[in-house]
Image (cartoon, rainbow, N blue to C red):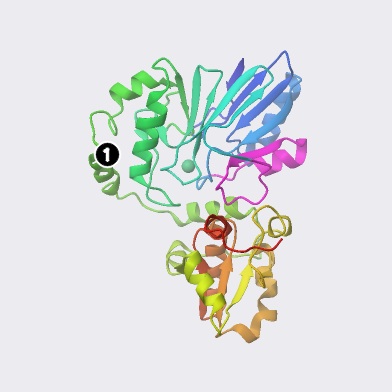
């Protein structure tokens, strides 16, 4: 197997390839380095089969959609990722081949709900930010959960063979690789700690939440990158009222049905997850322009809907900022709605 880290920095992007088959994949590519990746692929005469984000990134702009548009590679992420342009949606345990290289997908939530690790060639694992070399990724925003992170690390990654090489999404100390055995024995965040002790450690890190990070996260979630759309601040997002699928179904069935605005792309609205009957489709990038046409609804109840509830939280905060007074969000989005088995239309 041909293998290379391509950024030479703290933020890691990995190329894996079967040179004989001429097939390659990129893990966590950065938008700003797309030309570098295309040069390396051309030099080795490789066809880019797929591009993977191990999770929805908050610290850099993902290059997956750009590379997909330039090469036709399939954009691949976990099933619950909010990203609208994903072609292959992985579930835990999925297995695929890149030429002769076997790849197994492990759902390893904790850093984010949609975090996956890729167990490649039966000798290495790409962990994203769930576990880092002698550390772990933060679990305090973007749906992170320290308990889930502990379970992902101890019950999934640490059950791989001890000699498995480990490649994380970041490293801030100049390390390039580790092994499962080394992290089991020497990771100061995890080694010798119970689940509760780990949660306690993560709860008391008190890391700052830079607003710029939140903005990048929202762009990666929505693939809307437009100067006209001003993304809300973290404080504005956390003020959005979240309602679960049951509460929203009850409202729809009451005599005062709220306006439901679905902010996904058209293909998603009519796709696998369908949409709620009577909902109005306004893709997120078009929301500011559509606000005028919603003028009559300024003081009425409005429910925002998307795939996972992430993009629509952003949309709800935007509408609230534009003066709409009763905007609420479907928590968990159409994934949660479908999980309940509620009616949909396509
Ligand atoms: Fe991350």
In the rendered image, the vertical position of residue 17 relative to residue 304, given as above or below: above
Residue 61 falls left or right of residue 182: right
Within the image, what quadrant is residue 153 found in?
Answer: top left
For label 1, the SS is helix
Q: Residues within 10 Å of mark 1 (few under 14, many from 20)?
A: some
Answer whether residue 328 is visible to the viewer in this image. no
Q: How many labels were placed on the picture?
A: 1
Q: Which is nearer the eye, 91 or 143?
A: 91
Answer whether residue 288 is visible to the viewer in this image. yes
In percent of the image, x 32 and y 24: which residue is there?
184
Which quadrant of the figure contains the C terminus? Answer: bottom right
Residue 302 point in image, percent of width and height: 56, 76
User: Label 1, on which residue?
Assistant: 195
Q: Based on the picture, tell me whether residue 62 belongs to the magenta stretch.
A: yes
Q: Which is nearer the eye, 19 or 43?
A: 19
Residue 113 point in image, percent of width and height: 47, 46
Residue 248 point in image, percent of width and height: 52, 71
In percent of the image, x 49 and y 25: which residue is there?
125
Q: Based on the picture, tell me whether residue 305 belongs to the magenta stretch.
A: no
Residue 4 falls left or right of residue 272: left
The magenta segment = 60-88
């Amino acid at each position: 197997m041909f293998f290379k880290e391509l950024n030479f920095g703290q933020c890691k992007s990995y190329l894996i390839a079967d040179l004989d088959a001429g097939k390659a994949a990129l893990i966590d590519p950065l938008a700003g380095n797309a030309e570098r990746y295309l040069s390396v692929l051309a030099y080795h005469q490789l066809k880019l089969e797929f591009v993977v984000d191990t999770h929805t990134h908050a610290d850099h702009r993902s290059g997956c959609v750009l590379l997909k548009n330039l090469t036709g590679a399939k954009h691949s992420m976990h099933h619950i990722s909010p990203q609208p342009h994903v072609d292959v949606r992985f579930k835990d345990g999925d297995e695929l081949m890149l030429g002769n290289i076997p790849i197994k997908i492990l759902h390893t939530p904790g850093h984010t709900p949609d975090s996956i690790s890729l167990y490649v060639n039966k000798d290495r694992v790409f962990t994203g930010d769930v576990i880092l070399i002698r550390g772990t990724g933060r679990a305090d925003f973007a749906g992170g959960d320290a308990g889930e992170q502990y379970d992902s690390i101890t019950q999934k990654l640490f059950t791989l063979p001890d000699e498995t090489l480990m490649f994380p999404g970041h490293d801030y100390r100049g390390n390039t690789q580790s092994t499962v055995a080394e992290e089991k024995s020497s990771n100061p965040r995890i080694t010798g700690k119970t689940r509760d002790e780990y949660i306690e450690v993560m709860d008391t890190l008190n890391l700052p939440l830079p607003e710029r990070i939140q903005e990048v996260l929202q762009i990666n979630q929505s693939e809307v990158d437009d100067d006209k759309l001003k993304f809300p601040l973290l404080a504005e997002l956390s003020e959005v009222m979240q309602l679960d699928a049951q509460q929203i179904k009850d409202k729809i069935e009451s005599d005062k049905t709220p306006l439901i605005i679905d902010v996904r792309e058209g293909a998603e609205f009519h796709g696998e997850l369908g949409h709620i009957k009577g909902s109005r489709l306004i893709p997120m990038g078009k929301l500011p322009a559509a606000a005028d046409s919603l003028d009559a609804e300024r003081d009425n109840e409005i429910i925002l809907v998307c795939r996972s509830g992430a993009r629509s939280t952003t949309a709800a905060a935007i509408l609230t900022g534009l003066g709409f007074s009763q905007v609420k969000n479907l928590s968990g989005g159409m994934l949660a709605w479908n999980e309940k088995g509620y009616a949909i239309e396509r």
